[in-house]
Structure formats: C-alpha cells, structure tokens
Amino acid sequence: MDLKQQAALYALRYVHSGNIIGLGSGSTMALFIEELGALLKSGELSDIVAVPTSDETAQQARQAGVKLSTLDEHERLDIAIDGADEVDNNLNLIKGLGRALLREKVVATHAHEFIVIVDNTKLVARLGKRGPLPIEVVSFAVDSQIRWLTELGCVAELWLSENGSALLTDNGNPLVRCWFDNGIDNPKHLASLIKSRAGIVEHGLFLDMATKVIVAHETGITEMERDD
Ligand code: 5RP
C-alpha cells in the first residue's frame, strides 16, 4: 500500500463517532477522506461533522458522504487532520503547496488536536530544505512584496499557473513561493517578520501547532508527539 495511504488509514484511529473534525487539503487528505467515507458507509463511524479547508476537500468530502459544516457553526473542533510539505524534528511544518494554507491554519487553530499525516519523504532536518515556503499575499503591490521577501534571503517568485497567470487560492489571492538555499535559519523569527508585513495574508510556516505527526515509512508507522 502507498505510504500516504498507510498514514491516512492509521490516522482514522483518532477519529471517533460524534467528532467534529477539520479536514485539510492535498493528496494524503484525499486518501483519508475516502477511507473516512468508507467507515461512515459501513457504520463503523457515525455522526461525524467536518469543516473543510478548501473547495477541493469539500468536494471530496461530499462525494464520500461526509457531512460538512463551517467554523461559524462549530467553533470548537475535536481534531484537525492534515498533510504537510515538510516536518522537522520539533513537529514544525511547512504547508501550503496545495494552496490551502490560510484556511488550513485557521481550521487547525480551532482544533483541540492537530494531527499531521505524511510519508517519510516529508521529514527534514531543517525547514525550507525540501521545497519553497508558500506565502499568500493580496494582489495589490505584489511585486513590492516579492522584492521585500527577497531581501529576507530567499529567491521569491510569484506562483504561476501553467497558462502563465498568477495561481490563486480559494480566497482569490496570489501566492509567492520563497526558496531558501540552505533552508530557514530561524523559522520563528522569519514567521514573525513575514506576519507583520502589511499585504501579506498568511505564510506556510506552522510552528508549535501540530500535536502529533503520523509518519509512514517502508518499515511501518511512527508517531511524533510534542513534549509540552
Ligand atoms: C495543502 C497542504 C498539503 O497538506 C501539503 O501540500 C501536502 O500535500 P500532499 O498530501 O499532496 O503531499 O499544505 O495546502
């Protein structure tokens, strides 16, 4: 079985009947949603209500027969489950290469537990080593944001779709991708700098948020948990 599917299947042990859950976005989450739907159909799970983090996830959940809701209706989630692009030893993450980082962060913030499911290719010694950091910005003055981000020590570029136009999030905003040659030196410092810049909506650094990371390896599943 594919490693992403193994992580997705394993995570279902943390979902209980009656739970209100956050559903992240991406290919690992698509597998999780499919399995969740199967358990609902078989009656092994019931009364699950889910808050989706993207239009695509909402669509997948609807198809799987998962009842959807919003954070306005359910402010407190029992758990949020999501994939990640990078995971370091302290359970800090880079997310957003599925373009859903803003809603994913909002949903995770409302959850009692935030469980991340990945295959072992996502593990890194240092965030930013494996790929870019995605950053959602408003379209007003986007070139100026790119110049400012470049001054922070990365190669920043507007994320373009195949037809050459700016790729937009479900919120209608463009994304900038920041490539760091040797990874990110100090993720906390970088996160606070980026967050304080007017016109930047959100970034893909998810620091001190994950409560558990489920990692699928060729040899089996491991769980990483935060000490505090
Ligand atoms: C979407 C995300 C995804 O969780 C991340 O990109 C991982 O995706 P995949 O499961 O397809 O590898 O952050 O915004």
Image (cartoon, helix red, strand yellow):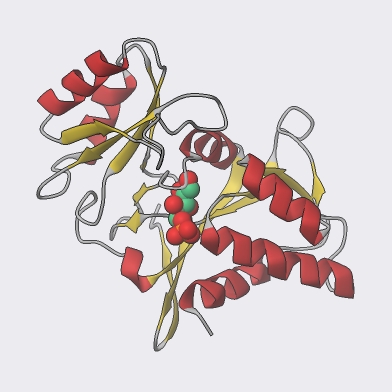
Residue 187 quadrant: top left
Q: Residue furthest bottom?
A: 219
Residue at the image point whose x is 34% and y is 35% from the top: 159
Vertical order, 54 against 80 (above or below): above
Q: Is residue 141 above or below residue 72?
A: above
* Above or below, comparing residue 200 to residue 28 in the picture: above
Q: Which quarter shows the N terminus?
A: bottom right
Q: How many marks?
A: 0
Counting from the top left corner in percent of width and height, residue 51 is at 70, 42
* Picture coordinates of residue 150, whole percent (x, y): 14, 27
Find residue 156 and report its image quarter: top left
Does residue 191 appear in this view? yes
Does residue 19 appear anywhere in the picture? Answer: no
Image x and y of residue 188, in percent: 25, 36
Q: Residue furthest front?
A: 163
Q: Residue at x 70, y 70 (%)?
A: 35
At x 34%, y 50%, the residue is 92
- Is 143 placed above or below 116 here? above
Residue name at image x 58 percent, y 49 percent: 24
Coordinates of residue 189 in the picture (x, y in percent): 21, 31
Left or right: residue 179 compared with residue 90 = left
On the rendered structure, is 26 left or right of 195? right
